[in-house]
Image (cartoon, helix red, strand yellow):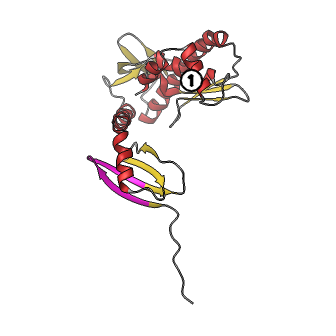
Amino acid sequence: MSMTRSKPENEIYRYRVDGLTVVVTRKKIKHGYIRIDSKTLDVLVSTPVKTDREDVEFLVRSRANWIKQKQAAAVEYEKRNNKTFEDGESHRVWGTDVAIINRIGVGRRQIVLTQEHLAIITPHEISLAQKQKLLGDWYANQVRIVGTEMIDQWAPVLQVTPGRLFVQKMKSKWGSCNVQTANIRINSELAKFPKAALEHVMVHELVHLLEPSHSNRFYSLMDQFLPNWRELKSLLI
């Protein structure tokens, strides 16, 4: 009895389009979409099964500016996160680069921000991983403090009653809102961007308490309450 080899569910191809490496996965989907591999910077395209190469090239070229922005953002993200924590190294705080200094002091481990430095003060020398965690926790606390102030400011304006605020490092989202519990979750990495960027994310999530989906009504509400939200969103690149 002869056996037939089953066809793979997804077909994957690699193209070069205008100097870009494009990895195409043909799937049983209705619409194509693009994302960027943050490590290799390859353009990852998922398309319906019958999409031909010409259509893929058209899709990639039509999103050329978006692709460049996302690749640049991925490179910048890697720079910001591959740190040695040596004295003088720049770390971003609320959109401004600040030099790290390491200091031995009495008491608990802490980070102190001055106009000139971001001081890591510890009772003894600590490892790179410990410094990374210390700074990560400090970023989260900064977002929690400023984010709470923004909720207190914006909740009465929007006439909503938010639940709890959670702050954590997230890989793919700046924020989220659980409309059932009214709890809001915010990315601690926002402490690296201007506070106006955090305000955009905070208002965005609060507006979801009025309109759960990203419908036309949602964006109309954003335009009503925060008319320059598109400009503020661009700060997150």
Q: Is residue 146 visible?
A: no
Residue name at image x 65 percent, y 13 percent: 158
Percent of width and height locating residue 73: 37, 33
Indicate whether 75 appears above or below 184. below
Q: Main secondary structure of the magenta part?
A: strand
User: Which structural element holds mark 1?
Assistant: helix
> In the shown orientation, is residue 187 left or right of residue 105?
right
The residue most toward the left is: 19
Expressed as whole percent of the image width and height from the top left, the position of residue 33 reads 47, 45
x, y percentage for residue 219? 56, 23
In the picture, which quadrant includes the C terminus? top left
Quarter of the picture containing the N terminus is bottom right
Q: Is residue 83 shown in magenta?
A: no
- Which amino acid lies under the numbered mark 1 shown in the image of this protein? Tyr
Q: Measuring 54% from the left and 24% from the top, which residue is drawn there?
A: 140
Question: In the visual, does 65 lie left or right of 156?
Answer: left
Where's residue 155, x and y in %?
A: 65, 13
Judge whether 91 appears above or below 54 on screen. Answer: above
Q: Is 13 placed above or below 119 here?
A: below
Examine the rendering and report whether any part of residue 64 can be seen. Answer: yes
Q: In percent of the image, x 35 and y 53: which residue is there?
A: 54
> Label 1, on which residue?
219
Indicate yes or no whether the magenta region holds residue 18: yes
The magenta segment: 12-24
Residue at x 47%, y 20% (from the top left corner): 197
